[in-house]
Image (cartoon, rainbow, N blue to C red):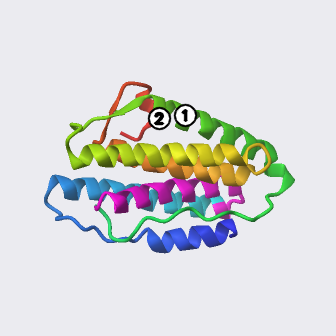
Amino acid sequence: MLIDAYGKIFAGDSRSEKTVPNDTVLGQTADEIAEMVSCYASDGRVFYKKGDLVNAAASFAYGSGWLDAGRYLGYLAGSPSAPPEIDEDLPPSLEDHLSEKTYRYQRMLTNALEGVTPAPDQKTAMYAAACSIEEKARSYLDGGAAHLPDDLINALVLFSYGYGWLDCGVRAGLFSISGDRHLFTI
């Protein structure tokens, strides 16, 4: 899939409706998740229009991770899906930027995963949800690493997508942060 097509699909999906009452803590969390999804859809379009395909792809994937985690947790309507495989050749002028960002996101997601623990009691459904989100983020970290070093754009998409899942889980209160708090949008 081309990055532009990915962005257009994500932009359409980003208008997912809330599934929880507005005037509740759940509604407030749903609003925060929806705002993050909307911001990354918008940011991705701006990057794309400026020719920054690297940041566009990362924004679309990160926002998609937030969207799908929000859907998985029941805050937003719809079902989670996996990010598409990008089959677009980026211009040679973006190679260094792509390499730097891909490896940086791999490090950031690794550090983020090392710096969180599930917060809910182990006997609760929310604990199981936290473990599932952590597992999802780890699987996308591993999936991205499997694309290295030959397919940097798809590695970046997978790292960004997995990071979005984890960050959404942190924002939803499913994790305690023992590591670098700056790795999360809290």
Q: Mark 1 points at which residue?
A: 110
Classify residue 102 as left or right of residue 128.
Answer: right
User: Height in image: 64 above or below 9?
Assistant: above
Residue at horizontal 67%, vertical 65%? 3
Percent position of residue 182, x then y: 44, 31
* Label 1 close to label 2 by CB (< 8 Å): yes
- Kind of element beneath mark 1: helix
Residue at horizontal 49%, vertical 65%? 81
Residue 16 position by quadrant: bottom left
Looking at the rendered structure, the kind of residue marked 2 is Leu
- Kind of element beneath mark 2: helix
Residue at horizontal 21%, vertical 37%? 121
Classify residue 175 as left or right of residue 44.
Answer: left
Q: Is residue 49 magenta?
A: yes
Query: Which residue is farthest front?
Result: 123
Mark pair 1, 2: CA separation: 5 Å
> In the rendered view of the protein, which quadrant contains the C terminus?
top left
Q: In the image, which residues are magenta?
A: 48-74
Residue at horizontal 32%, vertical 53%? 32
Classify residue 83 as left or right of residue 52.
Answer: left
Q: Name the residue under label 2.
A: 113
User: Height in image: 163 above or below 110?
Assistant: below
Classify residue 123 as left or right of residue 69.
Answer: left
Image label count: 2
Q: Does the magenta stretch include residue 26?
A: no
